[in-house]
Amino acid sequence: MANFGKINESNIVLSTLVVDDKKLLDENGVKQEALGQAFLEQLTGWPASQWIWEDGVKKNAMGIGCEWDPVNNIFWSPKPFDSWTKDIANAKWISPIGDVPELTQEEKDQNKRYVWNDETQSFDLIQY
């Protein structure tokens, strides 16, 4: 089964549909995104160019509300905080101070985790 996302003119995923792999096979038995796009255009009336195939080659999982970056082949989840930026090389959002700190085993045992505090621009260790 192949997952496709319908995107709008701003490259935001509006909905997703699953297509039988057989609809993507060309005469040589090779899956082709264009065949799935053509099938979905015929099925839904939405232009083929607005259907994106989440085929495992693209980075990050596709979901409703995600932004499709066609230049870098990345699905971006909504920006988690105003201060965070895109790390294109690693296909993830990063805080102004870098990655989330690693928890010690003791912190894990105590059910603690780090959460971003946009006001203080830091990760706060909390108990949950």
Image (tube, grey):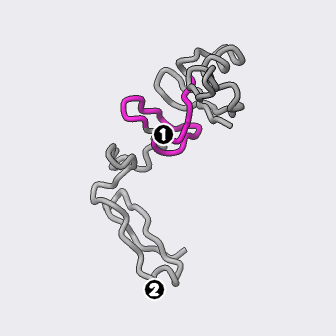
Q: Which mark is residue 57?
A: 1
Q: CA distance from mark 1 to mark 2?
A: 38 Å
- In this rendering, the answer to whether 33 lies above or below 62 is above
Q: Nearer the viewer, residue 111 or 102?
A: 102
Disc 2 marks which amino acid?
Glu
User: Residue 86 at x, y = what percent?
Assistant: 34, 44
Residue, disc 2: 106
Q: Secondary structure at mark 2?
A: helix
Upstream in sequence: badge 1 or badge 2? 1
- Binning the other alpha carbons within 10 Å of mark 1 as few (below 14), some (14 to 19) or many (20 upward) gives few
Q: Is residue 65 left or right of residue 1?
A: left
Q: Nearer the viewer, residue 23 or 112?
A: 23
- In this rendering, the answer to whether 124 lies above or below 16 is below
Residue 2 painted magenta: no
Residue drawn 40% across the image and 61% down it: 116
- Binning the other alpha carbons within 10 Å of mark 2 as few (below 14), some (14 to 19) or many (20 upward) gives few
Q: Which mark is residue 117?
A: none
Q: Is residue 40 left or right of residue 127?
A: right
The quadrant the N terminus occupies is top right
Residue 52 painted magenta: yes
Q: Nearer the viewer, residue 40 or 7?
A: 40
Q: Secondary structure at mark 1?
A: loop
Say which quarter of the image contains residue 120.
Answer: bottom left
Per the rendered image, the range of residues in magenta is 51-73
